[in-house]
Amino acid sequence: MKPIAVTLGDPAGIGPEIIAKAWLQEPGLLRGCFVVGDLACLRRGTAAVAGGLPPLAIADIEATGEAARLPPRCIPLLQVGERLGEPPPVGRVSAAAGALAAEAVTWAARAALRGEVAALVTAPLHKEALAAAGVPFPGHTELLQAEAARHAGVAVEQMPVRMMLANEELRTVLVSIHLSLRQALDAVTYGQVLETLRITDRTLARALGRRPRIAVAGLNPHAGEGGLFGREELDVIVPAMQAGEREGLDLHGPFAPDTVFMRARRGEFDVVVAMYHDQGLIPVKYLGVEQGVNVTLGLPLVRTSPDHGTAFDIAGTGRADPASLLAAVRMARRLAGA
């Protein structure tokens, strides 16, 4: 079984703490996983959650295969870059933190693309810190997309990716991600919708062992009501669905956005394809951020992440909840068959 790489995230945030808590709470689940990051930053995280007890041991490893040979409650760490003498200050945006976080993700992505790890689980990044470090990507998705395209020798545009947010009750995949609402409406095109349907079908078919039942949310209230409230359903979404159905995809809709998620939660569908960011993410997050998992679809690797940010306001206090990180590890194992 190949190991799973857990990237440290922004070391000024809660990433090191939720990683340490995850190893404390479920060492069996983390068996064979290892952390990609910096020793001083992870040590600070283990100390923050120790609660007066001796912190968890950290073992330096040089090869990914060493992780499985370590005892439980010992965190394997693969150092990237030069060791930091002093971690970046907690709760503050810094170029040093952004650079380390990006370096960890880049190393792990390249290892996954070489086939050395089964999956990536990425602790949260901070977009301002990435920008301060001069990283030319706003977040995980864009960085991983660029690395995958480079590895495949294709242009980034030829490596389309989509975001899925999932928990035990609901999965939703987005046609567009981080765009203004006005830009997101323009992104609902025939090509974008069809590509999203194809990526969703391909990825979930591997995970489920069968073609997924895909419900499609309309863009407009009441899914346009036959053109009374907008024609995007008639002119764009339905033609894309018809093309997907000709390819054998199991598609349903488009349905009114205010009811389709409830129907999927009841088990009628395996996943909902939503037209824009908030339409798809609000229902999943309402069910509980602590169980949500962010999955990047379309990459030639498995990547999952907790459904929360760096939480600078509580970083260093030891109060962060590792539930979403643990859910991300479980999801990564299922998707990778690890």
Image: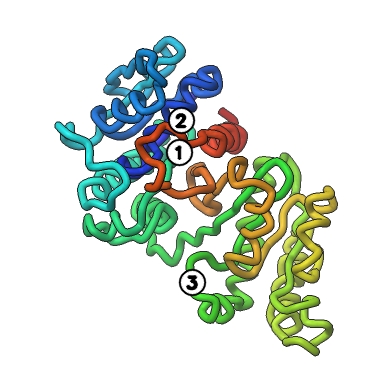
Residue drawn at the location 43% of the way across and 67% of the way down? 157
Name the element at disc 2: strand
- The amino acid marked with disc number 3 is Leu
Q: Earlier in the sequence, mark 2 or mark 1?
A: 2
Graded by Cα atoms within 10 Å as few (under 14), some (14 to 19) or many (20 or more), the crowding at tag 2 reads many
Q: Out of 265 and 332, give the one closest to the viewer.
A: 265
Q: Are the residues tagged 2 and 1 within 8 Å (C-beta)? A: yes
Q: Quadrant of residue 246?
A: bottom right
Q: Are the residues tagged 2 and 3 within 8 Å (C-beta)? A: no
Q: Out of 79 and 151, give the one closest to the viewer.
A: 79
Q: Which residue is mark 2?
A: 4
Find residue 72 and report its horizontal and vertical position in percent: 46, 13
Residue drawn at the location 43% of the way across and 41% of the way down? 122
Q: Spatial distance from mark 2 to mark 3, Cα to Cα?
A: 31 Å
Q: Which quadrant is home to the C terminus?
A: top right
Is residue 41 visible in this depiction of the protein? yes
Q: Spatial distance from mark 2 to mark 1, Cα to Cα?
A: 6 Å
Find residue 217 and report its horizontal and vertical position in percent: 73, 67
Graded by Cα atoms within 10 Å as few (under 14), some (14 to 19) or many (20 or more), the crowding at tag 1 reads many
- The amino acid marked with disc number 1 is Leu
Viewed as shown, does residue 180 lie left or right of 264?
Answer: left
Is residue 336 visible in this depiction of the protein? no
Q: Which residue is mark 3?
A: 179
Q: Which residue is mark 1?
A: 120
- The amino acid marked with disc number 2 is Ile
Name the element at disc 3: loop
Tell us which disc is closer to us: 2 or 3.
3
Q: Is residue 185 above or below residue 301?
A: below
Name the element at disc 1: strand
